[in-house]
Image: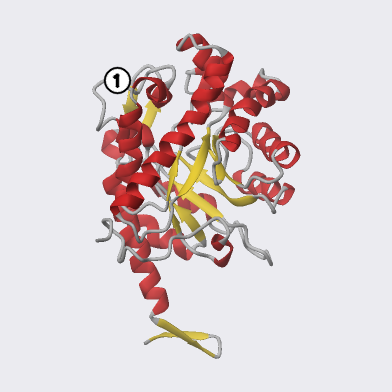
Amino acid sequence: MAPPGVGSSTQKRPSVASTADNDIVVLDGGFATQLSCHVSQQIDGDVLWSARFLATDKEAVIDAHLDFLRAGADLVMTNSYQASIGGFVEHLHLTKEESYDLIKESVALARTACERYQKEFPNSPAPMIVGSVGPYGASLHDGSEYSGSYAKSTPVDTMRQWHIPRIKALVEAGVDLLALETIPCRIEAEMLVDLLKKEFPNTKAWLAFSVAQDGKSLAYGENFQETARHCYEMNPSQLVAVGVNCVAPRLVESFISGINKDRRNPIPLVVYPNSGESYKVELGWIDRDKCEPVDTYVQRWLDLGVTWVGGCCRTYATDVSRIRHEVEKWKRTKSDKTCQNGQCVQK
């Protein structure tokens, strides 16, 4: 029996290494969104967001991961986006050592979910485990990951020292790669790419930016394509992809179109948008009338060269199943073409 959205339980799952051959990797969806199906407590608005449940409801965390795997995701991202040593010390009253271990626990819970999934589907290859690394602004609990406003007043070394132990914990716990995600400003992105090279030279990662509504800028205002190219060129051996996350699906194409124009070696692209809604700290999720199905855009993104695709906030396991369906349909269409003398025609 195969999980929903996957044609066969013996189907080869992409790996970190195989993505160089343009395999399409299906990501999971919004972790806190799916977690809300398993807990009764409020998640949105919590200063620790979903990371609190690493301490309070481990089984719910495992179940949310399992939902995504059963829906056809090739990987699970750890519940560590808003996890930090300082945050756990202050809000869970843990010691620094206990806080460090709790970040590692996010990997252990993801691994448990993968093991349970493989028992259900014994012919399925092991899913990847990706360590979620949210931006410094997420810890401020003021929505500044969507504006980058903290870049004005926060020294880059402060950001660096905040990130180091949380990344170290994820790497030490054995993630397959890192997701440096929702990064709203160039200074933090460059620091993270440099940190990866100097402190974690054997670890790969993708870098996904938080972007503005204009279709061309980072949340903090810098040009997206220029910044993305620069960061990739800083460390192409460790970055498996660069792209955008937690942006309205309708805006994705404007950010990635043309980013690889005239490049001999195209930048691998990662895309995982939200539902189209917007988050305000004082109001929560708004603009529900702007929701749009992520899957309706997937094939176009793949045509533009995206090789890592999934969902972010307000996307559920059902959305991942639809994304998987569109990916498989696109792959079948591609395989049904034969190329003769540089011209591709339908069989």
> x%, y% of residue 270?
51, 51
Q: Quadrant of the N terminus?
A: bottom left
Residue 126 in view in this figure: yes
The image quadrant that residue 163 belongs to is: top right
> x%, y% of residue 321?
29, 53
Near-viewer residue (39 or 312):
39
Q: Could you tell me which residue is drawn at 40 percent across and 70 percent down?
A: 331
The image quadrant that residue 315 belongs to is: top left
Near-viewer residue (117 or 194):
117
Q: Could you tell me which residue is drawn at 56 percent across and 29 percent down?
A: 135
Q: Amino acid at mark 1?
A: Gln
Instruction: Report whether 34 appears left or right of 179.
Output: left
> x%, y% of residue 137?
55, 24
Near-viewer residue (108 or 198):
108
Near-viewer residue (297 or 42):
42
Instruction: Report whether 32 appears left or right of 94.
Output: left
Instruction: Report whether 187 appears left or right of 36.
Output: right
Q: Is residue 197 above or below residue 101?
A: below
Q: What residue is pinned by disc 1?
A: 42
Task: Kindly give the residue lying farthest to the bottom in the view shown.
Answer: 341
**SS class of the residue under badge 1?**
loop
Residue 275 in view in this figure: no
Q: Quadrant of the C terminus?
A: bottom left
Q: Is residue 217 above or below residue 240?
A: above
Task: Kindly give the residue lying farthest to the right in the view shown.
Answer: 198
Instruction: Report whether 234 appears left or right of 310.
Output: right
| Colour scheme of the picture | secondary structure
Quick one: label 1, few (<14), some, or many (20+) residues within 10 Å? few
Q: Is residue 125 above or below residue 106?
A: below
Q: Could you tell me which residue is drawn at 69 percent across and 53 percent down?
A: 236
Counting labels gives: 1
> x%, y% of residue 139?
52, 20
